[in-house]
Amino acid sequence: MKRLPSHQQQRENAFGRSCVALRKKMGLTQRALGELLGISEQAIQHWERGVHAPSPEHLERLLALCLQHHAFAPLREYAEAQQLWRAAGKPADFDASWMRAQLTAPFAPSALVVLKREAAHSAEPLVKQEPPSTSSHLDWDDALDVHDFYGREAERLQLEQWVVQERCQVVSVLGMGGIGKSALAVTLMHQVAPAFQSVVFRSLRDAPPCQDLLADCLQVLSPQPLSALPGSLERRMDLLLECFQAQRYLLVLDNLESLLQARNPEGRFRAGYEDYAVLLRRVAESSHQSCLLLTSRESPAELGSLESRRASVRALRLAELEQEACEQLFEERDVVGTTHDQLRLVQLYVGNPLALKIVAEAITELFGGEIAPFLQQETVIFSTIRDLLAEQFARLSVLEQALLTWLAVVREPLGAAELQAMLVPPVAAVQVSEALEALHRRSLVERGKPGVGQATFTLQSVVLEYVTEVLVERVSEQVQHTGWEHLLSYALEQAGAKAYVRQAQERQIVAPVLVRLRAVYRQKEAVEEQLLGLLSQLRPWEQEAVGYGPTNLISLLRELRGHLRRLDLSRLAIRGAYLQGVEMQDATLSEATLRDAVFTEAFNAIWAVAISARGTFWAAGSSRGEVRVWREGGHTLHLAWQAHADTVERALAFSPDERLLATGSWDGTIKLWDLERGALLWTGWHTDVVKNLAFAPDGQILASCGEDATIRLWDAQSGTNVETIAAQGAVFSVAWSSDGTQLASGYFDGRIQIWELQATQPATCVQTLSGHTHWVLGLAFAPDGTQLASASWDRTVRLWDVESGRCLHTLEGHTERVHTVAWSPDGRTVASAGFDTTIWLWGAETGSSRAVLQGHSAPVYSLAFAPDSHRLLSGGEDSTLRVWDVARGQCVRLMQGHAFRLYDVAWSPDGTRLASAGSDRLVTVWEVAHGMPRVLRGHSLTVEGVGWSPDGKTLASGGWDNAIRLWDQATGTCVQVLQDDDHPDNTFHAVAWSPDGRLLASGSYLQGVQVWDMTARTQHWVGHTHPTVLRRVAWSPDGTRLASGGDDSSVSLWDASDGTLFQTLEGHRGTVASVVWSPDGARLASGGGSGSNGEVFLWDAHIGERLRTFADAPCSVLALDWSPCGNLLVGGDSNGRLRWWGVQSGDCVRMREAHQGAIQSIKISPDGRQLASCGDDGAVKVWDLESGELLRTLRRDRPYERLNITEVKGLTEAQKATLRALGAIEEVTLPL
């Protein structure tokens, strides 16, 4: 092997960094890679450290292996392979024709690549598709890349002895900052990985809470939904120890000192991090077969006392680096001197590798690389690494200091162009690049995680900590003394940062600044007064001059106060403020100029997401029928409009050319929109709920399906229904094959059918796939069309071979119904999600679980991969859109909506109070006279029904969390929870008390009518027809009968005493959303419908005859109630209108535009004089029943209620509309 040709190449070592990155992408240890390439583990180490370059033969072996493991980025394989070849110093040897042959060869993912140089001599491939020598699961992406590790062989062998041979349970690597603890731990981790079932590396430098760290680690060691993880910290520790006992794991926690108190010689944990002390004690004192490896500058007190008492707890304190290794370090940096001079230099800097790297570069720059003249300068020698960093920091240029500070803010690898965009004032790109290279030479920045060809920079932990402290200290001082430099030049937190980074910025920068300020000012009010004063001083400044100042003050105020209510932000230039999830009632942004601000969105529960073919547009559809479209990777809101009158459920699709967007809804309609203008092009109809739709690959045909048991094919240009495929039951999902010749459909009974489509012939079913036992809600073809993924409410995902119809893999792991599935464009990953709130990532080839993504707090309804396959978009019932980094398994962006749909409203028996419930999981009780609310918290999911007991003492609420809660109205406390113990995934959709208060009835999901004995608080009877969702239940006035209505288009009448079904009223064509008895109990009214077909029927309650159909119901009627005298029927529809009908004539006698969005519930007051309504807009409205006059509106404050945005600049019209929907106001000046 040849020595790399120059010290400069050794220092940069682009090939070594790339080699490390590619090896990690393939999930291989150094030993495993060496075995696959037929070389030694030491050779791999030399490649990665830059000691030697590979031969052309070995380089070709490496390229072939990378192609097999898909380690190169899709569509960039050739370019990245060529870059890797050049980085190895062999540009002339690159065989382009051989490389193209490898790329175009039709091999399957598991096929073998035969290398050019050996093909003529042997049929045996040089690279065999065998597993590496270890089956360890490696999760060490957080680990630094160790390119230049020096010496420490004795220490490494000692650690290996403790960790592997002696099987110690806790091993600590201790030493001063920069001494090489992390590098040693990472080197050891790579070498001992084969001895463990799984290896997990986590950095603690951003101080994650113990609860979060445990959840993160458990997802690797024991993948399961977040909802299945124990809630208590103690139980999570129990589960970790159970994993440690069952298998042999290595858990590496780097930078433990980040959690310890500063300047505390006893090694005590910081306030809020004491739980780590408990964790360390339990791991050290319990019996298990795993190992916890720690690095820290000091030993935690909990371990210090155990080291002498337990042989399984060991600590290695790193001393100075040995002289031979230091000499190697000097040689590689062109630093020369006598043996005596080198020894003196090492002694002066106590053998600290980081300090020696920094000093070596200074010697090279100032003294031509000679040690002797440097030693003669009487240079101030540091007493700690921090002193050296302070000295070096002071010597840096203003730009270099700025770049270090920004890297401390960002806290992860960043490229030169990204850093340049953050600088205030702007700096030329070439200056930024030169400054970064200078910092790298001085060992103050490191090359970040490389993808091939990427140049990113990051900070070593000790440098990061130092620069962060300098930033915190200077910002604190400038707030106190009205200084501006750091306040204006740097963002303390970034609105557009990845979610986990922004959280770290809050913990590590914003919060510590406030700690310092509160220590000075003593009182919180005094700190607030100082911050407000600085904001006022910035108001008259020019926009270009204020930089990040206003944003930083806003961040500090938000963290200090917990809200921004009544804050005056008028006439300020605000850059990158994070205002999402922040209450800003009665604040003002009038005449402010905003740039890159992040606000709460106005969407409700997200049931559909989509990303266009090239990623230009991202879209989401909500439970209110609203659709939103973003540009620029989801960062800029492009369009937002009320597309439908009801939920858009996974019926959202971009045309392949990105010009059109198709939407479908529970309102029964299909609509096609022009993306640029937002114009409606055409509308099509199903006769029932539309569940799913998809464009054919050529964009000419749009397929849709629904609960009307049809699959419909539409001409995308004209909207003509070109074919209707009749099905045997509701069709829940459709998906096209990549060549457009096949269409898959999923059904209510678990079947999947494959249809073959021809231009001149009707569609033909060519395959029926059987295996699921419940609804099939999600389908996705593999990009090559050979496989199909299906998601079902039977809690499984299946991968099918399309040609044979054989189930290749059944993917099990979800603990609840699986609602959606997506296949990544590169074909490697299948993602699934559902009611257990988690997203599972599966290896498409093996069917094995790769990761479980945690973050949603409610069911996840829809998924979409970005074209690069690296990002995944998800939407769910918790009103959030989340963007995930697929490789890291972390949420990088969160878009928070505001859940405000109200499903039910109910009057108290005395008519003085109203109760409402909705998608925000809350029950609200209003005093009608003065509108004061009381909020009852306890449900964990949407609450769809509320009802008062006849005596007014108890309020019942039914929710999607399988809970009926009973609330004491005197105290507002929950006194009991009723649950369906036999069906833990049940949801309750309605509640109603019997007239005597002895029974409580509820409608449920698939589990019939459930009636509870309220004296015994036990289930009295359950009434079943066939599985359906029962949305409303109503008692007859005498309490002898119970009516129910739901999604099966029928009304059922039950005997209240024993649950006998004595009558079924049929005739509705869509969902029955409301049932209500006449005051005399002789008649029954029912309302519902689908799409534009509203239905209101009047029935004879004794014989079941339909007496009348009410007119003027152009859309679904979701709510009904009778007037006390029985001569009027009032209804609320999905378009937000109230209608009064004369019962005798059936004519509509009055109509009011009442709500924005659907009306979900209406109730007439006990005295018959007022009507209450609620719906999708989150408002409860009270009307005069006789005149229809609006008397009052009851609404809990939305996030931006009364926020003044008059003449605000920098917001699009769509963004302003969102703010107005959440309560913001604009003052209009009328012309004179």
Image (cartoon, helix red, strand yellow):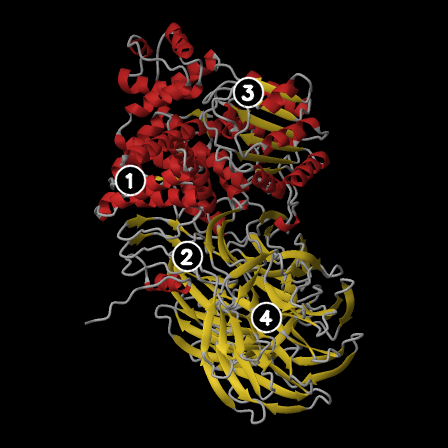
Looking at the picture, tell me which residue is in the foreground, 1227 or 393. 1227
**Left or right of 502 in this view: 920:** right
Q: Is residue 291 above or below residue 1000?
A: above
Which of the numbered marks, if any, corresponds to residue 235? none
Amino acid type, residue under disc 3 in the picture: Glu
The image quadrant of residue 460 is top left
Marker disc for residue 488:
1
Residue 575 seen by the camera:
yes
Please state which amino acid type lies under the numbered disc 1.
Answer: Leu
* Separation of marks 2 and 1 at Cα, in angstroms: 28 Å
Query: In terms of sequence position, does the residue under pointer 3 or pointer 2 come before the other?
Result: 3
Whole-number angstrom distance, CA of label 4 to CA of label 1: 53 Å
Q: Which residue is depicted at the point 52% across and 44% down?
A: 888
- Residue in the foreground of this view, choosing between 9 and 3: 9
Closer to us: 995 or 856 = 995
Three-letter code for the amino acid on which mark 4 is drawn: Ala
389 or 605: nearer the viewer: 605
Q: Is residue 165 toward the left or the right of residue 48 in the image?
A: right
Count neighbours of disc 3 (C-alpha within 10 A) and say few if under 14, some if 14 to 19, many if 20 or more: some
Q: Position of residue 315 (x, y in %)?
A: 60, 20
Q: Secondary structure at mark 4?
A: strand
Q: Residue tagged by mark 2?
A: 634
Counting residues from the start of the chain, the first of labels 4 and 1 encountered is 1
Mark 2 Cα-neighbour bin, 10 Å: few <14, some 14–19, many ≥20: many
Q: Nearer the viewer, mark 2 or mark 4?
A: 4
The mark nearer the N terminus, 2 or 1, is: 1
C-alpha distance separating marks 3 and 2: 49 Å
Question: What kind of element bears circle 3?
Answer: loop
Label 4 crowd (10 A; few <14 / some 14-19 / many >=20):
many
Q: Which residue is mark 3?
A: 266
User: Badge 1 local density, few (<14 within 10 Å), some, or many (20+)?
Assistant: many
Q: Earlier in the sequence, mark 4 or mark 3?
A: 3
